[in-house]
Image (tube, helix red, strand yellow):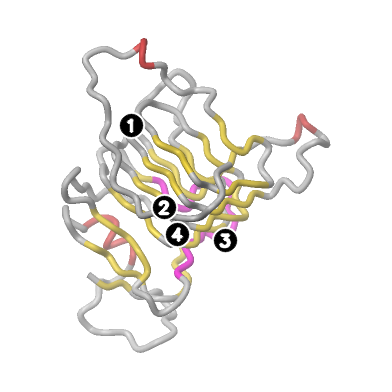
Amino acid sequence: MHVWPADPKGERQASGLADLATAFAGAKPGDRVLLHAGAYVGPFRPSACGAPEHPIIFRPAGDGEVILTNHGDDTASVVETQPGSNCLYFEKLTVRGGRAGIRGIGVRGTVVRQCRLYDVLYGISTGTEVGKFECQDWHVADNLLTGRDQDRRKYVKDHYGAGINIAGRGHVVCHDRVGNFWDDISTDHVEHPSRSSGLSSPTAPRMPSTSTTTT
């Protein structure tokens, strides 16, 4: 399944989807959505739903950098998965601008790996409201996240945001490089296992070996 930006760098095939928003809404379990090089302007609100054994994967087609952006609109996330849009994988994408790069609302099994996120207040966020732990079983690995906070030691009251804001239960965060955020990795609202009942341990997706630095 192929998607091209509004201003593609190469020739666009007639068989491709109309746009990325269409793919985010209409992809089916097991689909691999290949994004061709260029900028895709959001914000995007994925509502498609994969399955644990058949996730929906969004990754570059291989002809150049894929950039998802909403041009720095600090009132909205660039990508914000909607309730029930489980088992979506985001791989090797560049996400820039916006309040958050990739944010989830009540979803399970999201994977964000080998992505680059920058010029955001929050890079990757499973957080909703304080005390609500609706996201589960995310896998966040091998990403490069760069925030806007060049000197977080100054003007503390005016500074906020986090590179990875992880809330909920069953999440795995590893081998990410994070910098220039007020809080690089926040676990303030992680639900402790003792507060849960009747829940099985999550099974993380298999990750390829990497050589990135753990933060």
Q: Is residue 105 above or below residue 141?
A: above
Name the residue type under label 3. Answer: His
Position of residue 190 relative to residue 25, above or below, is: above
Inter-mark Cα distance, 4 to 1: 25 Å
Question: Which of the two discs, 4 and 2, sits closer to the camera?
Answer: 2
Q: Residue at x 27, y 73 (%)?
A: 2
Q: Is residue 180 magenta?
A: no
Mark 4 secondary-structure assignment? loop
Q: Main secondary structure of the magenta part?
A: loop
Looking at the picture, tell me which residue is in the foreground, 207 or 160.
Answer: 207
Mark 1 = which residue?
A: 136
Secondary structure at numbered mark 1: loop
Q: Is residue 142 above or below residue 122?
A: below
Residue named by callout 2: 113
* Amino acid type, callout 2: Arg
Is 154 situated left or right of 2 in this image?
Answer: right
Q: Secondary structure at mark 3?
A: loop
Q: Which residue is mark 4?
A: 42
Residue that badge 3 annotates = 71
| Residue bounds of the magenta highlight | 66-80
Instruction: Give the number of the disc on residue 80.
Output: none
Q: Secondary structure at mark 2?
A: strand
If you read the primary sequence from the N terminus, does the residue marked by circle 3 or circle 2 appear first? 3
Of tags 1 and 2, the one toward the viewer is 2
| Residue 62, image quadrant | bottom left
From mark 4 to mark 2, how far is it between C-alphas? 20 Å
Q: CA distance from mark 1 to mark 2?
A: 16 Å
- In the rendered structure, the answer to whether residue 138 lies left or right of residue 200 reads right
- Rendered-image quadrant of the C terminus: top right
Q: What distance separates the C-alpha of mark 4 from that of mark 3?
A: 8 Å
Give the quadrant of residue 105. top left
Closer to the observer: label 3 or label 1?
Answer: 1
